[in-house]
Image: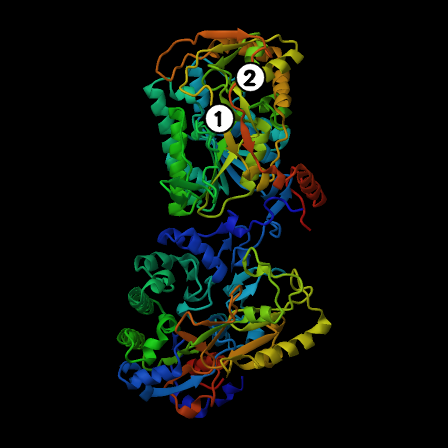
Amino acid sequence: MKLHNAHKTCWNCPAAILKGNVDFRACGQSLEAIRRRIEREGLLIECARLPDLGHFEPTITFEECPEWRPTKYGYLLENMRVMILGIDGYLGWTLALKLGALGCEVSGVDCFLRRKMVRELGTDSVVPIYPMEERLKAAKEVLDIDIKFREINILDREKLGQFMREVQPEAIVHYGEIPSAPYSMIDCNHAIQVQYNNVIGTLGLLFLMKEICPESSLIKLGTLGEYGAPLTGRPLFEGLFPADAVLRWRGREWSLGGELTPRDPVSFYHVSKVQDTFNIYEACKYWWLRSYDVMQGVIYGVHTDEVAADPRLRTRLDVDEWFGTVVNRFVAQAILGMPLTVYGEGEQIRGFIALEDAMECMVRLISSPPEPGQYDVVNQVSGLHKVSELAETVARVAAEFGYDVKIQRVENPRVEADYHPFEVVSTKLPNELGFTPKVPLEVEIRRMFELLTQPHIVERIRKVAHLIRPRTWWSGEKKVVETLEVYRPGTRRRRGFKPRLITDRERFPVSKVEEVERAVEAIGGGEGGDGNKG
Amino acid sequence: MSGNIYIGIAYLSIRKGGLGRGAIIGLDGVPHGLVEDLAHRGVMPNFRELLDEGVLKPMRSSIPAVSAVSWSSMMTGANPGVHGVYGYTEFLPGTYVVAYHSSRWLRAPPLWRRDPSRRYVIINLPATYPAGEVNGVLISGFVAPDLERAVYPRELLGELRELNYKVDVDYVRASSSPLLLFKELAETLKTRVEVCRRLVERLKWDVLIFVVTGTDRLEHFLWDAYRDEGHEWHGEFLEYFRHVDEAIGEVVNLLGEDDALMIISDHGMEHLEVDVNLNRLLEDWGYLKLENEPKRSYNAIRHGTKAFALDPSRIYLNRVGHYPRGSVEKGDEERLLGELTELLQDLRWRGRRVIRRVYRREELYHGDAVDKAPDLVLVPEEGFNLRAGLFREEAFEEGELSGKHTEWDALLYVRGVERDALPESPSIEDVLPLFQRLMEGEPS
């Protein structure tokens, strides 16, 4: 059994220098033309890591290449240079530690915008986080990880470019965006701030990548919310229509295969993500950049082995109405004995993923770069849930910890359907990238209770408790939402649509996953990425 | 080679007392017959004049007749068995990954390393990329994917970029329209001559090597335009050779009368009638087994493969221990080579013989690098263009290009010598010793 990316070749590898050897960026040849040329005439590349090989065809597989080492997440470039934009954030910091533990050379930038924004809103991370200097020191002391950090606002292209030139990243993870729908809906200034930071920041990054590191892959955080929740119930494909999708109209038919699927963003923040999608899509087309646009479900949780290794290594956790995601908010409310606030009917369905699983997905994506010019999209979710059901689950786990929790329905300040069908296709991560979710919802919620019930954290939650209940209306009004109903968990009749997650996992059954893991152990791969291929 | 002994007294008496400077003008892929023809037709008047001052002869190229091999032989004076270059491609050791030629492959010292006391100006010499250190200037010729590493010393790079110096014509543009091809050819040549002029006037030099490669490109694309006077591009074809002749004139004018001068080509050219896909044949005959998908180069070679071909006409046994899925044991080698030789010799297309000769490696090559040599090397009959042709569906296909290399009629011109001063049947391996003697002006 081979690792998921064993068959990928130099063509996918960021160490393969194409610029100067394949002059396609200048002449705008089509991807198909290049593929034909590879097959028929051969194509030259050089290896930035093994320059003595001279020029050769990009056909060495990751399995064969001595630079790609087996790990439990697939082959990974030895000491792979990964740059994280937004490294101080909830995901950025967590991923930095995970990649560092895998032997990557991690670098990152952040301008601490998130720390400033929450301060301005009068809130804060309920899990204490340390200044970057101390974080870096702790990473070195506890995990022996060196992280190259620079305080840079990604809108400062000159500084960001200088750092990129210095690091020459082989993958760039872009978490450097303002990640909040309600924040973008506060008022005009906030909407502009979100869109300017996100859209212009990403656009500038694309230009810098073209100039400095066109071979590196961009792993860009989008959101499942880009698609919206179409009332027709049509499946939410992974960004692009599959080959057999057809548009039928007045007796005629057209293939939709390969076209971008419709986007229906649900806030000005989501609009910024959609605009990013188009900018990245075009950059891949014009300049042969390569990217995974990650349509991530709503994230929750606090745990990875690395962040749990020391209090100084913990990642932030927000529970306020702007930056707190729903599960994280529920757990905080439960701990304070507050009813869990469900917006509207609570029948809204969303995709979700635990922090630890999301980090594994990101590592797998970094390990498996797209082809030059390829814009690819993955729907990064491990489960679909109704908001009201999540409240029930949190309440159930809360009871295990001795909390008697009620659920309250409140006015929905957002413009969204209370009832809607929801069918999400997420086949690439399980089938092409070897990902199987490891963290059941309840398990992560238990971990959250274990951490958040520590007295000093309870105290911090108490300080921001008044900011959990929403007051930011999509209409522009500023008023605290009214309660519509309060009920005990398990007493409300289930209504609405049943979500459907299509993973095609039968193509990659669990037994196969275990087989892969055994194979990795057999060839000596592990967390450290220091396995020997022999 | 035995040709060295023909460098005779007649020449030496003329060159006696020379200044020890010399120039080689290379015309890539230009057959002896074409130059003779165009010189006499008035298309190449400068060359016509040179014919009166020296001797022009056909020269045997390398086998296979590809520039990487033949220029390596010319610049080292050595057989491929010594210099180790058998084609533009080799596999990376222990893999089926095709690597392209690098100057690092060369196992024998080229002229500028054999005699580093002289100062060199070398412009557009094929098979020298990446450009290594030289006493003087070296601008590599094709294949040179990156101009930056094609230039020694690097300080020259800015000037070349300002002049829009190109190593080669832009294939993509050239193949999209003959008009663009001629435009590319003219611009490339003009810049090349300008660079030559600047360097020669500016630098102190002892050896100038100046190579034109547009000739080979044009002939590949439009050989028929040369042969057929009614061809729509016939006039443009001749016009380009007029430019080449002017370039020769300009370079010669940069030399002193006593400077040695050779004009050479690395192989000849003829009409390409049909492409012959050797790997298709090997697959049809059961010697090559390929995975159907993915069609990813030679990595598709399966266990059980006995032989495969690399461009242009090299056949290798898939030896156990040499290759990842090697399937030929030592004891089977002789039988397999015998079978393949017989099949290839009997190969017919529309009743015509395809292969003129099947060489065993030991018939062609000698030296320390013979272990890397192909097991069989084929020389085709006229009109047949041998190529590896991996994943091609047909063994014989209508030629994609118009001209193809030949092994027997490269050109050798030497100024200031008598006919009998040159070898009877010179080979490209004679070029270096001949040039060195010309430079010395004395028997060595």
Quarter holding residue B246: bottom left
Where is residue A224 drawn, in percent x and y?
A: 47, 30
Q: Nearer the viewer, residue A200 or A4?
A: A4
Circle 2 sits on which residue?
A494
Circle 1 sits on which residue?
A421
Disc 2 crowd, CA 10 A, few/some/many (<14, 14-19, 20+): few
Q: Amino acid at mark 2?
A: Arg
Q: Which residue appears at 27% of the width and 82% of the height?
A: B45
Q: Nearer the viewer, residue A342 or A64?
A: A342
Residue extending furthest front?
A: A251
Residue A334 higher or lower than A238, as above or below:
above
Residue A141 higher or lower than A250, as above or below:
above
Where is residue B100 drawn, in percent x and y?
A: 51, 63
Residue B54 higher or lower than A162, as above or below:
below
Residue A187 higher or lower than A226, as above or below:
above
Q: Which mark is residue A189?
A: none
Q: Secondary structure at mark 2?
A: loop
Q: Secondary structure at mark 1?
A: loop
Residue B28 seen in the current view: no
Viewed as shown, does residue B192 lie left or right of A163? left
Quarter holding residue A134: top right
How far is disc 2 from disc 1 in space, using C-alphas? 14 Å
Residues at marks 2 and 1 on the same chain: yes
Where is residue A287 drawn, in percent x and y?
A: 39, 47
